[in-house]
Image: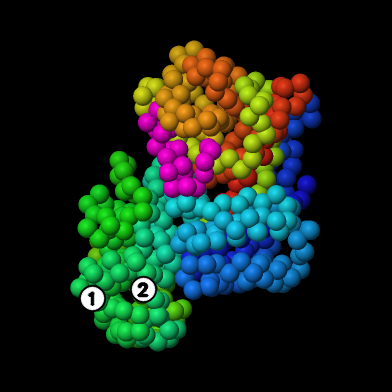
Amino acid sequence: MIIISVGIDIGTTTTQLVISRLTIKNTAPGSSIPRMEITGKEVLYRSEIYFTPLFGHEIVDSEAIAAIVAKEYGKAALTPDKIDTGAVIITGETAKKENAKKIAESMAGLAGDFVVATAGVNLESVLAGKGSGAAAYSKQRHRVTVNIDIGGGTSNIAVFEEGRVIDTACINIGGHLLEFERNGDKITYISEPARAVLRTCALSWQAGDRVDLEELKKIALVMAECVVESATSGNYSELAQELMMTPALTMDYHVQEIMLSGGVADFVYDGFTPISVAQVTRYGDIGPLLGWAVNQVLSSRGIVPERPGETIRATVIGAGTHSVNISGSTITVSETALPMRNITVVSPFSGEIPERPEEIAVRVQHAVQRVINDGSSETVALAMEGPRMITFNAIQNLATGLAGGMAEFIAKDKPLIVVLFKDCAKVLGQTLQLKLGEDVDIVCIDQVEAGEGDYIDIGKPIMGGRVVPVVVKTLVFANNGV
């Protein structure tokens, strides 16, 4: 089966889309329950990269966004009825704009069954790290890898170990926080985060002022120091602390590689050398100069960043795609809670599940808070492989830990959703129900593989209640087969 998928990224500075062709096949033996998987991915078309259309600095121009999408469909020789699925991701400062929700809703009606997300900063960090190739690199090279995605309004940081995210953070620094007349030295806009940087540098610039290159370099280097600090150090300057949008990285791991993505990253890797203000402000901001400054700061610390597969297209190089599955036949579901759609998947464990319930609870709570507290999602599914050995004690400890870690969220009348790869959902679900009581909706399914940053749909039970249809909506990234 072939499906066509579109991904649309509406960011602080740029908007773009990519169209992909996905091959889906039943990989199960003929006598088994069907298991549908994506077996092939091919990027058919990459759009131009547009500046995100805004009215002033607070309102996204929804009509202009729709016109961009329609224009690019035409250039790709596709009509909306030919698109089967896709993802619309609203990221960075754009996600804060007054009508971001309206944009998401209007994009959802384009075609197919779109995943639509106003990405909170932690979710955006994960998506960028997948798109750049940092997640895959960490798995292939067995090295803890930090991806820093420097965009127009924020720098999103994700740490990956063996392909899984283990930490995220975000700092309010990007290349578009100071705006200029293109190819000119006249300031047209200063954002609040940029004003904080100016205060630190003892500068009192205002819109309309003209600046020179040395002053701009000073600003860019201070911004770059904050970005690098936030991704590599537990010791933050007062400015970095002020600009952090999330808790700091835990730093309870040893970082072995650093990658950079986002629109600023190309200026880090390509050896950009600033020689004039006009050259720096070619895009109406200081993105190129921030890239130069990040390179300078990394070099001063002896850090040589690994080049990713994608930079400016990292966050959504592909689209939301459907990996259709049938759950295992040993499951526990509260039928009244189904169907459920577009549930954000989080992976609490980067490796084996801890043995102690207390540690399980802490990991679960930390993972869920990443996407609940920043507004990325209201309902989550906990994805994990399952206990190393499926024993009575292992199931009891896992159930106790899950119940403890999710206590705060269950109290808000949300179901407890667990997605396992190993075939043990029925016994785990029954144990959870005994611990939490009949008033709590439990959805515990197995033989489904989902990962951090995916979205999942779970349908009503079929085949006499023995299985449920599951759709895992992941993001397809074009990075040497990743």
Q: Position of residue 94 (x, y in %)?
A: 49, 62
- Whether residue 385 appears in magenta in the rendering, the answer is no
Q: Is residue 461 above or below residue 174?
A: above
Q: Is residue 189 left or right of residue 383?
A: left
Instruction: Name the foreground residue: 474 vs 257.
Output: 474
In this orientation, does residue 441 appear? yes
Q: Position of residue 475 (x, y in %)?
A: 59, 50
- Whether residue 366 appears in magenta in the rendering, the answer is yes
Q: Which residue is identified by label 2?
A: 190
User: Residue shown at 58%/25% (left/top)?
Assistant: 441
Inter-mark Cα distance, 1 to 2: 12 Å
Instruction: Name the foreground residue: 310 vs 171.
Output: 171
Q: Is residue 159 above or below residue 336?
A: below
Q: Position of residue 435 (x, y in %)?
A: 48, 16
Kindly state the secondary structure of the residue where label 2 is placed: strand
Q: Is residue 424 left or right of residue 6?
A: left
For the stretch drawn in magenta, the main secondary structure is helix
Q: Is residue 110 above or below residue 138?
A: below
Kindly state the secondary structure of the residue where label 1 is placed: loop
For label 2, the crowd category at 10 Å Cα-Cα, with few meaning under 14, some 14 to 19 and many 20 or more, is some
Instruction: Name the foreground residue: 351 vs 412.
Output: 412
User: Residue shown at 51%/53% (left/top)?
Assistant: 119
Q: Is residue 213 above or below residue 251?
A: below
Q: Which residue is identified by label 1?
A: 203
In this orientation, does residue 390 appear? no
The amino acid sitting under disc 1 is: Leu
The amino acid sitting under disc 2 is: Ile
Q: Which residues are magenta?
A: 361-380
When asked about the image quadrant of residue 473, the answer is top right
